[in-house]
Image (cartoon, helix red, strand yellow):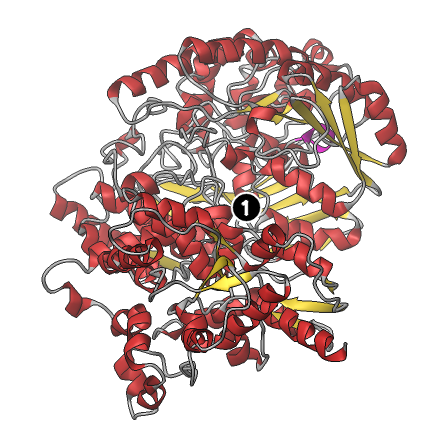
Amino acid sequence: MRRGLRHPGLVGTHQERAGDAARLAAELRAAVAGDVDFSVTARALTTMDASNYRRVPVGTVAPRDADDVAAVLEVCRAHGTPVVARGAGTSIGGQATGTGVVLDFTRHMARLVSLDPEGRTAVVGPGLVLDRLREAARPYGLTFGPDPSTHSRCTLGGMIGNNACGAHSVAWGTTADNVRSLNVVTYRGERLTLGRAGREGPGGPEGVAASGAVGSTLAGSGASGASGAPAGLLDLVGGHLSLLRTGYPPGLPRRISGYALDALLPERGVDVARSFCGSEGTFGVLTEATVRLVPLPAEPVLVVLGYADESAAAEAAAGLLPYGPLTVEGMAADLVRGAAGLPRGAAWLFCEVDGEGAARALVRAADAVDSTVVRDPAGQRALWRIREDAAGTATRSRDGTEAWPGWEDCAVPPARLGAYLREFRALLAEFGLHGVPYGHFGDGCVHVRIDFDLWTDKGVRDFRRFSEAVADLVVAHGGSLSGEHGDGQARAELLPRMYGKELVGLFGAVKDVWDPDGGLNPGMLVRPRPLDEGLRFAGLPLVGLGREAARCVGVAKCRVAGPSSGPGVMCPSYRATGEEKHSTRGRARLLHEMALGEVVTDGWRSEEVREALDLCLSCKGCRSDCPVGVDMAAYKAEFLDRHYAGPLGFLRRPRSHWTMGRLPHWLDVFGRGLNAGMRLPFAARLAGVTPERAMPRVADRTFTSWFAERASVRTAALTLWPDTFTDHLAPEVGRAAVRVLEAAGLGVALPQGRVCCGLTYVSTGQLGAARRVMRRTLDVMAGGEERATGPTGPVVVLEPSCAATLRTDLPELLPDDPRAARLAASVRTFAEALETLAPDWEPPRLDRPVTGQTHCHQHAVLGDAADRRLRARAGLTGELAGGCCGLAGNFGFEPGHYEVSVACAEDQLLPALRGAAPEATVLADGFSCRTQMGDLAGVRGRHLAEVLAEAVDEGETGS
């Protein structure tokens, strides 16, 4: 480290490092009011951001205010420990990771301090999420202009640190364009309020230089004046004015790379606040910011323009700028997963304008193959979601190959974008790489994830060679190595190619003025680590759970909470607790560290990993909502299976795993006798059930026994799956389904033997037992062990969680049994069966509103399009709530889960029930959802089959 900087984790023996860390933690706890956490979990959660890099911190602090920040810096300076500021941890260059103390501003310093609608400004804490500011400003017709695709979780501090931009930068500029003043603390404890010293001088740069005003403006005492600059900064800049005026590429709206020292020129007002933006936490630590707000468009209209190819779209983008669009976003067909709502073409520009007239003018000027004008806000959101999800979607190609950041967001002058993209695609082909460019075409900024091989030595060498080649290409087009996300470690080493050694040397001198000890985010921007050093894949096994967890690229869509969370499910436990370790990303990071063995050292026995996974509801929401398809429910099942493996593992398992985890077995053995057993004293405790819950009552008669005693009315067209919940706990659902299916003209049969999908065994991590249950089920469905066929027709599954298990877990756990794939392919939901097998059947008209919840597994695995169509045909109007009910099978019954279970229900389900019309029908196809409704709201939810069966019976009685 520079200037003698040292810290725990880099020097000394293991015992010395541990002792240093313990002393540092103790002094920090004595000095600050915030949270000091040097635990294994805290360190593991902050080793990575959304980049390819990994750095292990010694600990974390969540400061409460600026005084805490100053105290942390004082203690760390005394110990020679570096400090890195962190917001949402979505930086793509590695700049949100650190080897010393990481400051987490999202916990306590996330306030909207004030909002001035008349002055169009807001004062914000560094940890405030962008969407919270936008929601507060919206009632006044205002917004914060920069809006990166991570707007639902990125923080204002992180945006200032990286000078973030977003889709609307063609209208409202970068974050630096929207900052008024900044309160910062330097590593040496100096508190500064950064602003702008003056206005542009008359005559521009040449006039100022010719008049000799430069020396009087910048040189002299070195006092900060109105700008708030640290002592010596303006003197240093005053000695290099010619270099600053000629060293930056012109005509480049997205020049984010390096330090913005040209903002300190006298003709630009000596804007120290602006020059601080994009410094990636290397100058000082932000504690508060005053930002500019801009008026929202009065009549936002989205114009989507279709073009023949990517180059045509890129070349058209610059020509649209004179028409005043608010966005000019570009993407090609190889990034789109389903082009619903998009006009004809193989590439598109997403252009938002203000007003119908502006939309018509833009369409006339565009010379596009086709166009779509969208005025409906819901339709606009649906199309924008395609673009916003690109950051994650681009990480997996259509053939399943993984793609990574690394050359993520370069920018060239907009007029050169078409030519640049053609050469960039050729460079990819030359290196045998694949990537899908997209991004802010109106500003010449291109995002791309590339399928680098970052696992092998040769692949890493090729990664370096390609990075150097593409840097030269960008510079040849007059571009910037970073056009949005900053340099971090990924590009800082290459900055001399863009700026030259003299200007990069000045960057280092300016860093030394701000931070003489080199204690703030060392290794970023100046004196950087090599771009191929410290990759997060180094040492990770090529196969196994750690390799699967590494799919998480850290874009943190799982960290969304509040109104901007949208209709998705992921991640209910994070929404309930707000803790990173309870997010999908947090759990993936812990599994990643477990596989590496450096921070999490006890492997499959790790209590830190078990604790983080304990509040995972296995909702499967991440399987669909995570842009890269991280499947935490499957990872949890495998971890629990390994965690409790071994000769005495069964003794360490929670009792709930033996009771609720094997519920199908106990129900088959004891049936309704369990009702009496659960009324015995201490029965809940013995069963491992929380006392806040009452166990569901077992039905007096099973669905299968009822079905066996009735005569078949016609030849069976389908097999109805008698899942455990329907058979023993809610047989009325099975009877209703039979009634409706037969009314639709469909014959129904049941399997000739006991079947079980294995859900409860999977969710409790008993995978050996799950496979045995699944194999027995396949034997039954195949007609005996001697047959290797499977079901000959559709298998209708009423319980969404069981249907999802059959669709996904069954073939994944038994990949070598072809019967598993056949059974999975035959599974149909109740609505899918009616739609495909009885397309001409008209359901009874109910004409009433509905409320309730779409099961989380249905959202994640099965989809609910057929259900929506069936409800519409029956006259059931309105939307069902998203999210997760919070009961989630065994989860809500287990000790220690009740409060989180209730909080999950309060996220979407319970508000939907409270806000429903009195006459609304309450729908919930999942047994857990219906149980949660009854327990927490006193409401009886019903399966859609029950509602339709009741109407069928009433219709026949009436006739």
Quadrant for the C terminus, please.
bottom right
Q: Which residue is mark 1?
A: 155
389 and 838: which is toward the camera? 838
Residue 365 placement, left or right of 249: right
Residue 681 placement, left or right of 942: left
Instruction: For mark 1, give the secondary structure.
Output: loop
Give the residue displayed 32% in from the left and 87% down from the top: 673
648 and 557: which is toward the camera? 648
In the rendered image, residue 665, in percent from the top left (x then y), is placed at: 29, 72
> The disc labelled 1 sits on which kind of residue?
Thr
Residue 690 placement, left or right of 235: left
Which of the 4 quarters of the picture holds residue 246? top right
Residue 502 lies within the magenta run: no
Most distant residue in the right direction: 357
In the rendered image, residue 125, in percent from the top left (x then y), is placed at: 56, 51
In the rendered image, residue 22, in percent from the top left (x then y), is placed at: 22, 54
- Look at the image and tell me whether residue 323 can be seen: yes
Give the residue displayed 51% in from the left and 52% down from the top: 862
Which of the 4 quarters of the picture holds residue 548? top left
> Quick check: 664 above or below 786?
below
Give the residue displayed 60% in from the left and 22% down from the top: 445
872 and 640: which is toward the camera? 872
